[in-house]
Image (tube, grey):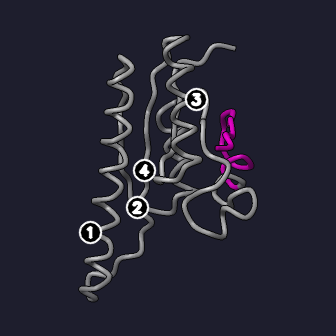
Amino acid sequence: MMYNRILVPLDGSQNADKALDVALGVSKNFGCEIQLLSIVHHIHNDADSLSSKLYEGLSTNAHKIIEAARDRAWNKGLTIKGYVRDGNPKKEICEFAKENDADLIIMGKSGANAFDRLVLGSTTAYVIRNADTQVLVVNA
């Protein structure tokens, strides 16, 4: 099967970085388009300045993750598209893949939080069960 568009969700974890490496290799060999997605878990409350500041920090971090990944791709001679969205990461990944006609999702086995690192991450498990496309899970 040939893939045309690969979605790589990024959260700054080692597993997500490894998933990006795999996607860059696939793209370089087969000429597929890569779309990066970083999601800011929608937790902020405008009435609470601390929550608002936390949200701003998370949003800034998500943009930095995308920029760093773009730089890695550029260094390999590839141009990729990056997106930052707000919401529930599990649902946003599946929705983004469907909206953007992703042929394949390449993602890390587990994410950045401690609980996810103990087992197959809850976000990864959700995406495997609910995505309308194939999912390749990468272990760092």
- The Cα atoms of the two marked residues, 3 and 4, are separated by 17 Å
| Few, some or many residues within 10 Å of mark 1 (<14, 14–19, 20+) | some
Q: Position of residue 18 (x, y in %)?
A: 57, 39
Q: Quadrant of the N terminus?
A: top right
Q: Secondary structure at mark 2?
A: strand
The residue at the point 54 percent across, 46 percent down is 16
Q: Magenta stretch containing residue 128, yes or no?
A: yes
Magenta part of the protein: which range? 126-140
Q: Mark 1 or mark 2, which is nearer the start of the sequence?
A: 2
Q: Is residue 59 above or below residue 97?
A: below
| Few, some or many residues within 10 Å of mark 3 (<14, 14–19, 20+) | some
- The Cα atoms of the two marked residues, 2 and 1, are separated by 9 Å
Q: Secondary structure at mark 3?
A: helix
Q: Mark 1: which amino acid? A: Glu
Report the residue marked by disc 4.
38
- The Cα atoms of the two marked residues, 1 and 3, are separated by 30 Å
Callout 2–callout 1 Cβ contact below 8 Å: no
| Few, some or many residues within 10 Å of mark 4 (<14, 14–19, 20+) | many
Callout 1–callout 4 Cβ contact below 8 Å: no
Q: Magenta stretch containing residue 104, yes or no?
A: no
Which disc is residue 56 wearing?
Answer: 1
Callout 2–callout 4 Cβ contact below 8 Å: yes
Report the residue marked by disc 3.
22
The residue at the point 52 percent across, 53 percent down is 13
Q: Mark 4: which amino acid? A: Ser
Is residue 81 toward the left or the right of residue 119 in the image?
left
The residue at the point 54 percent across, 11 percent down is 29
Report the residue marked by disc 2.
40
Of residues 48 and 50, the one drawn nearer to the viewer in this rendering: 50
Image depth: mark 1 or mark 3 in front: 3
Which disc is residue 89 wearing?
Answer: none
